[in-house]
Image (cartoon, helix red, strand yellow):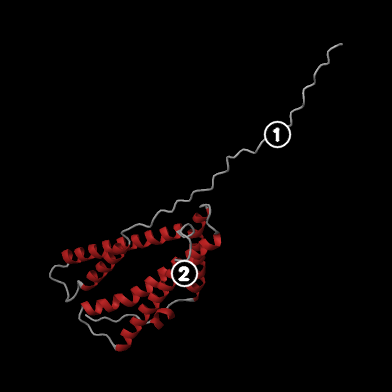
Amino acid sequence: MTFSPISTTEMFQSVGIFSGFLLPIAVLLLFVVLVLPGLARSGAKPEILALATYGYLAESLGIILMTAGGLPAVYAVVAHQTLESNTYFGLLLLFIVGGCTFLLHDAMLGKIDSLSKAIPHALFFYTWKFIGLIVTLFAGLSFLLEWLLDVGNHTQGWWVVHLVMLLYGFLISWFTVQPPPTVIHHPAKPSLVLPAKKKVAAKPKKTSKKAA
């Protein structure tokens, strides 16, 4: 059982011109879907909301890069396989770039107020929670189905991929156990102070003169 991860050069060469045009459009549509619901929340500025959305998209990119660099290395260790030194260096580089991307944008998001980033944060949190659920269920079900349907035909180390993906799903689910805090915006109440009434000077009463 051999392990040969796809190289970065081959991955980028496989992307056609058509996909290159669709990628910016897809990102723009994703921005619209994420930003428009937040505009309904009073007190959130559109430009700050868009900045928060960008930050969480960049964090997701960092997570994907760390996953691409970490999972193959963990798989090789569990399967007792030795990779070439340049392969380890490439995987380590992917993980470092992903980690730096995540940390830099996490620091940027820390400077944004909670009201402006509430909706993008909730979408980011529950999206990764759903991804963790999908990975965990698929890894567990694929392990059980292959174990039950291919009895006696298993190759050596067939369970490694299922175990690694199951651990990855558990890791994402563990990081998304506690939901984000709810931010409640209290709009300013109109002032109930009545305007002061103008004082009108009392007119002096006329005294009737008695006839002499």
Residue denoted by label 1: 199
Residue pictured at 46% horizontal, 60% vertical: 117
x 58%, y 40%: residue: 192
Q: Which residue in the rendered view is the most extreme toward the top?
A: 212
Describe residue 4's horizontal placement relative to residue 107 as left or right: left
Left or right position of 63 against 51: left
Q: Nearer the viewer, residue 128 or 187?
A: 187
Looking at the image, is mark 1 or mark 2 nearer the viewer? 1
The number of numbered badges drawn on the structure is 2
The kind of residue tagged 2 is Met
| x then y, percent, for residue 166 | 25, 67
Label 1 Cα neighbours within 10 Å, binned few <14 / some 14-19 / many ≥20: few
Residue at (20% x, 71% y) in the render: 159
Q: Of 189 and 136, which appears nearest the observer?
A: 189
**For the residue labelled by badge 2, is the local secondary structure a helix, a strand or a loop?**
helix
Quadrant location of residue 198? Answer: top right
Point out residue 111 in the picture as x, y percentages from the top left corner.
47, 66
Q: Position of residue 40 (x, y in %)?
A: 52, 52
Q: Earlier in the sequence, mark 1 or mark 2?
A: 2
Disc sitting over residue 92 in the figure: none
Question: Which element type, helix, strand or loop, lies under badge 1?
Answer: loop
Which quadrant of the structure image shows residue 124? bottom left
* Residue 85 locus on image (x, y percent): 30, 88
Query: Which residue type carries mark 1?
Result: Lys
Q: Quadrant of the N terminus?
A: bottom left
**Which residue ends up furthest to the right in the rendered image?**
212
Residue that badge 2 annotates: 108
Q: Which residue lies most toward the left here?
A: 152
Distance Cα–Cα, label 1 vs label 2: 57 Å
Instruction: Determine crowd level at label 2: few under 14, some 14-19, many 20+ residues with C-alpha closer than 10 A.
Output: few
Indicate the quadrant containing the C terminus: top left, top right, bottom left or bottom right: top right
